[in-house]
Image (cartoon, rainbow, N blue to C red):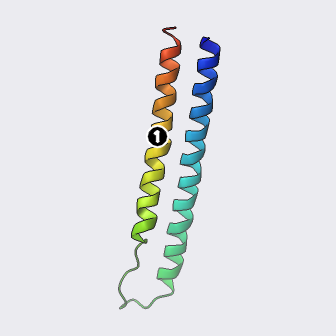
Amino acid sequence: MALLINAIALLVACSGALVLFITRLHAQRAMADLAMRSEERAIDQPMLFLDTHTELAHRQAYRVGFGCLGLALAISWLSTHF
């Protein structure tokens, strides 16, 4: 029974880690694109910022990823008690 619970915890942890990895890649690419677009602009023009929806999506994805890792930890801890 504990082996099955640990397998589920591993599956949840891997999916959470994948979400965090993909989100970090997306955030780095968005910042690189923003830097590239900012360099092309004249110095007296206003600064460019990331879109609000993009920032909210990144935050939500980070929450989901870390939530999955926390859930996996809790599931793994539970398997030691059964």
- In the rendered view, tell whether residue 67 sits above or below residue 72: below
The residue carrying pointer 1 sits among few (fewer than 14), some (14 to 19) or many (20 or more) residues within 10 Å by Cα, namely: some
Determine whether the residue tagged by mark 1 lies in a helix, strand or loop: helix
Depth check, front residue: 13 or 30: 13
Residue type, numbered disc 1: Phe
Residue 42 horizontal/vertical position (percent): 43, 91
- In the rendered view, tell whether residue 52 sits above or below residue 56: below
Residue 18 horizontal/vertical position (percent): 60, 44
Q: Determine which quarter of the picture holds residue 49.
A: bottom left
Please give the name of the residue rendered at 39% of the width and 89% of the height, measured from the top-left corner.
43
Please give the name of the residue rendered at 62% of the width and 31% of the height, measured from the top-left corner.
11
Q: Which residue is mark 1?
A: 66
Depth check, front residue: 30 or 9: 9
Q: Determine which quarter of the picture holds residue 15.
A: top right
Depth check, front residue: 38 or 61: 61
Q: Which quadrant would the N terminus be assigned to in this image?
A: top right
Going by the image, does 72 lie left or right of 11? Answer: left
Please give the name of the residue rendered at 46% of the width and 65% of the height, measured from the top-left corner.
54
Residue 17 horizontal/vertical position (percent): 57, 41
Residue 28 horizontal/vertical position (percent): 54, 61
